[in-house]
């Protein structure tokens, strides 16, 4: 049956392409495709579908909603290349999309959002000019966070984790100001991983454990997973329930290696600046349909 459907679909597609060769058909088809009416119908259909998705994931109940979503924001440069615009514009579009995603997460009352903004590898693999653009975007984004009504009305605490000592002074200053401006909040926690690497995080945790043991503050038999977790950059965070990576890559790229041991992973081909609210809902619905096994 499936083979017959595919065969029929190919024949219909071929017929459509053949018909479009004729002006009497192609001209009206082009007008319809470019008309505001067509876009209105498409937009309304997409909105209806998105709202139905939202209602379904909410109807599953709060116990089925992930409490912590982590996102690998990949695809800014490919988004730009596909549109023949410079990479700076792609990164700027990615920054704008992050603000949208935060609003969608808050609307779902998901208390923890963690995003991978810059890896330790990026600090050495990216050109200096591109890094300068990224640093400027981080500064402007953090400055906006400090005064953003969305952040303050929802009592969002902001923290930046990673080897931030590797970042320029003006970025570290913006980090300190954003963290200070939201330090009194606790309803939601937004974590940005900057100059971050999962292996580096584990190394830093092991160094702390070694120092505590050498000082006589930590017995060798007390070193267990909890001891390591409590010394990670994300010690005040629960492990992610759902990790979403955009842009079609299916790897974790040194992101939260310890924390995502039992997380559900979701990969989408959508480039980060094109990530829509419906894409988020689809990822959450996929998560809700899975049976979490925690290694069993």
Image (cartoon, rainbow, N blue to C red):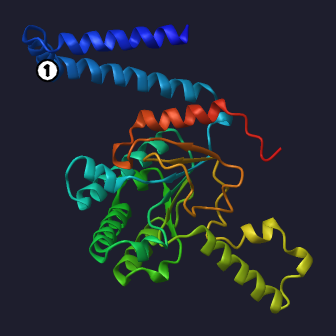
Residue 95 in sight from this viewpoint = no
* Numbered-mark total: 1
- At a point 32% along the width and 56% down the height, the residue shown is 77
Which residue occupies the foreground of this view, 110 or 46?
46
From this view, report whether residue 246 is shown above or below residue 202: above
Residue 273 in sight from this viewpoint = yes
Looking at the image, residue 135 sits to the left or right of residue 67; the answer is left
**Residue 86's spot in the image, x, y percent?**
21, 58
Residue sticking out furthest to the right: 221
Which residue occupies the foreground of this view, 230 or 189?
230
**Secondary-structure class at tag 1:** loop
Q: Which residue is mark 1?
A: 35
**Residue 266's spot in the image, x, y percent?**
56, 42
Which residue occupies the foreground of this view, 64 or 204?
204
Answer with the quarter of the image where residue 44 lies.
top left
Quadrant location of the C terminus? Answer: top right
Looking at the image, residue 117 sits to the left or right of residue 287; the answer is left
- At a point 51% along the width and 38% down the height, the residue shown is 108
**Residue 18's spot in the image, x, y percent?**
21, 12
Looking at the image, residue 11 sits to the left or right of residue 161; the answer is left
Answer with the quarter of the image where residue 144 lies.
bottom left
**Residue 268's spot in the image, x, y percent?**
48, 41
From this view, report whether residue 47 is shown above or below residue 288: above
From this view, report whether residue 241 is shown above or below residue 181: above
Quadrant location of the N terminus? Answer: top right
- At a point 75% along the width and 88% down the height, the residue shown is 211
Crowdedness near tag 1: few (<14), some (14–19) or many (≥20) residues, C-alpha within 10 Å = few
């Amino acid at each position: 049956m499936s083979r017959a459907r595919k065969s029929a679909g190919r024949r219909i597609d071929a017929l459509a392409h053949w018909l479009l060769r004729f002006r009497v058909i192609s001209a009206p088809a082009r007008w319809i495709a470019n008309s505001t009416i067509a876009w209105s119908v498409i937009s309304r259909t997409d909105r209806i579908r998105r709202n139905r998705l939202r209602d379904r994931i909410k109807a599953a109940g709060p116990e089925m909603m992930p409490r912590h979503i982590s996102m690998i924001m990949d695809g800014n440069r490919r988004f730009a290349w596909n549109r023949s615009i410079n990479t700076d514009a792609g990164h700027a579009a990615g920054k704008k999309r992050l603000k949208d995603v935060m609003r969608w997460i808050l609307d779902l009352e998901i208390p923890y959002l963690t995003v991978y903004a810059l890896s330790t590898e990026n600090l050495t693999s990216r050109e200096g000019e591109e890094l300068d653009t990224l640093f400027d975007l981080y500064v402007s984004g953090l400055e906006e966070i400090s005064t953003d009504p969305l952040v303050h009305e929802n009592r969002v605490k902001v923290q930046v984790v990673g080897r931030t000592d590797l970042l320029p002074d003006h970025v570290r200053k913006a980090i300190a100001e954003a963290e200070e401006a939201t330090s009194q909040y606790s309803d939601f926690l937004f974590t940005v991983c900057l100059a971050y690497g999962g292996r580096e995080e584990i190394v830093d945790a092991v160094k702390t454990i070694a120092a505590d043991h050498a000082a006589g503050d930590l017995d060798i038999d007390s070193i267990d997973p909890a001891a390591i977790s409590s010394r990670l950059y994300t010690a005040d965070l629960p492990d992610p329930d759902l990790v979403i990576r955009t842009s079609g890559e299916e790897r974790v790229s040194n992101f939260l290696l310890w924390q995502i041991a039992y997380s559900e992973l979701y990969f989408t081909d959508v480039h980060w600046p094109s990530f829509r609210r419906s894409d988020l809902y689809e990822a959450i619905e996929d998560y809700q349909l899975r049976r979490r096994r925690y290694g069993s």
